[in-house]
Image (tube, helix red, strand yellow):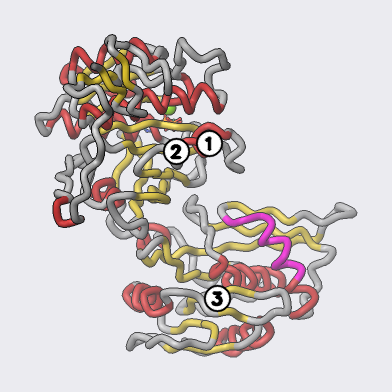
Amino acid sequence: MFVCSHCRHGSSKWFGRCPDCGAWSSARESSSTATPRPVVTTLASAAPKHRLSTGLAALDSVLGGGLVPGAVTLLAGEPGIGKSTLVLQLLDEMAAGGLRAMLAAGEESLDQVGLRAARLGIAADHLLALPSTSVTDVLAAVEAERPDVIVIDSIQTLVHEGVDAAPGSVTQVSECARAMVGYAKSSGTALVLVGHVTKDGAVAGPKALEHVVDVVLTLDGERSGGLRLLRAIKNRFGACDEIGVFEMGGRGLKAVPDPSAMLLESRRAGVPGSVVFAGLEGSRPVLVEIQALVSKSSMAQPRRVAIGIDSRRLIVLTGVLSRRAGLSIHEQDVFVAAAGGLMVREPAADLAACLAVCSALRDVPVNPGLVAVGEVGLSGELRRVPGLERRLVEAARLGFTAAIIPSRTERVPAGIRAIEVEALGDAIDAVAALTNVSA
Ligand code: TYD
Ligand code: MG
């Protein structure tokens, strides 16, 4: 009797592909004719999973300690962001650690992968590589080679012969993933799937996979900038509050130990339109310079351009600035950017963006010792943000001496003066009062 390890379909004959759920290589011999019933136990019997270190400390901490054997991780990100680079570095480190590491390359030829490996200084001979887009080939290869870790780059290029759908379509991607996930679970192999998403998440493929996999990692950043942020947005084996900050350089991705210092490195203090935002990425405080430029528009409809922050938020904020704080920007083009190529997604950056626009419009620099944090509501009120204390501790560590914040409930660390304000207008006044004083 053979039972599908995936859906428990039973059959008296061995099958390569389960006739019921379509999973490949999921047939397992079973001594009884009935599918085995689960036994009730207590959670105490659940053994803690051991983990495979990826050799990249920043990646390990995002994963919560490393890859879990038998678990499936989806690495999602826009094309060109560095996914292939990251997985190649991971495979190299794991192979160097004595594990069998294999790459199934569907997207690029082995020559291209080899060039990347050479660029990264990776000795290509200890990595197993398979140039194929066929699930059957991949499953046959992994059955034969029994790697400890497999990377599929990318899941969108994989094709399941039994499925009549275009590569990259939701049906095709889901079926391929299902087959690979079935193999990973039954063999205890750590599986990493690379998936492309576009800016608005339009490619449905990876989204459709999120519930099938155990861990979803996203890699993002402004492609032109060097900075890349790795986050876990789902993790069945750990928390989602760690982030990894990397920099894409000439030899691949390198962890950035002190992102705030790096982001502020090239800041020119005392320039109009620059305000430092005390941000929080997961549980990690990150200081980011928000820059604004305001210039008279030649268009009937002035432009609002956001780089590294949400463009819809910028439109709302310019509306609030003009209606609630009396700024005359309705005939001005407004450009706002998060410096350093970081994507700032927090509403807590609203205040810094507004103050930057105000400073740019008036052509008056804000005090360089100042950070700002707070969400701005539609009526111009300032809203509380989570993790205020952590943000301010980081600001104090980097030498900032004053912070404009919403009314607080948390402690403010020593060394930093907290200026509590209730509304955007008050914040603008507070900044003006600080301009000529040392903060
Ligand atoms: P890649 O990993 O191919 O992106 P993805 O798989 O997400 O599409 O990397 C994309 C970019 O990274 C590419 O434009 C070149 C650049 N890059 C570097 O800057 N340094 C490097 O060492 C490597 C390997 C790539
Ligand atoms: Mg790639």
Q: Residue at x 58, y 88 (%)?
A: 421
On residue 197, which mark appears? 1
Query: Is 414 placed left or right of 278 in the picture?
Result: left
Are the residues flagged by discs 2 and 1 in contact, CB closer than 8 Å? yes
| Residue 44 position by quadrant | bottom left
Q: Residues within 10 Å of mark 3 (few under 14, many from 20)?
A: many
- How far, Cα to Cα, is label 2 from label 1? 6 Å
Q: How many marks?
A: 3
List x then y, in percent, for residue 289: 50, 64
Q: Main secondary structure of the magenta part?
A: helix
Q: Name the mark nearer the viewer: 3 or 2.
A: 2
| Range covered by the magenta-colored residues | 309-319
Judge whether residue 312 is colored magenta: yes
Q: Which residue is mark 2?
A: 76
Please report whichever mark, 2 or 1, sits nearer to the chain's N-terminal start: 2
Q: Residue at x 52, y 75 (%)?
A: 373
Q: Which residue is mark 3?
A: 374
- How far, Cα to Cα, is label 3 from label 2? 30 Å
List x then y, in percent, for residue 191: 29, 31
Looking at the image, which residue sits at the far front? 33
- Kind of residue sitting beneath label 3: Gly
- How far, Cα to Cα, is label 1 from label 3? 30 Å
Q: Residues within 10 Å of mark 1 (few under 14, many from 20)?
A: some
Q: Quadrant of ligand 2?
A: top left
Q: Residue at x 20, y 22 (%)?
A: 30
Up the image or down, 165 lies above or below 269; here it is above
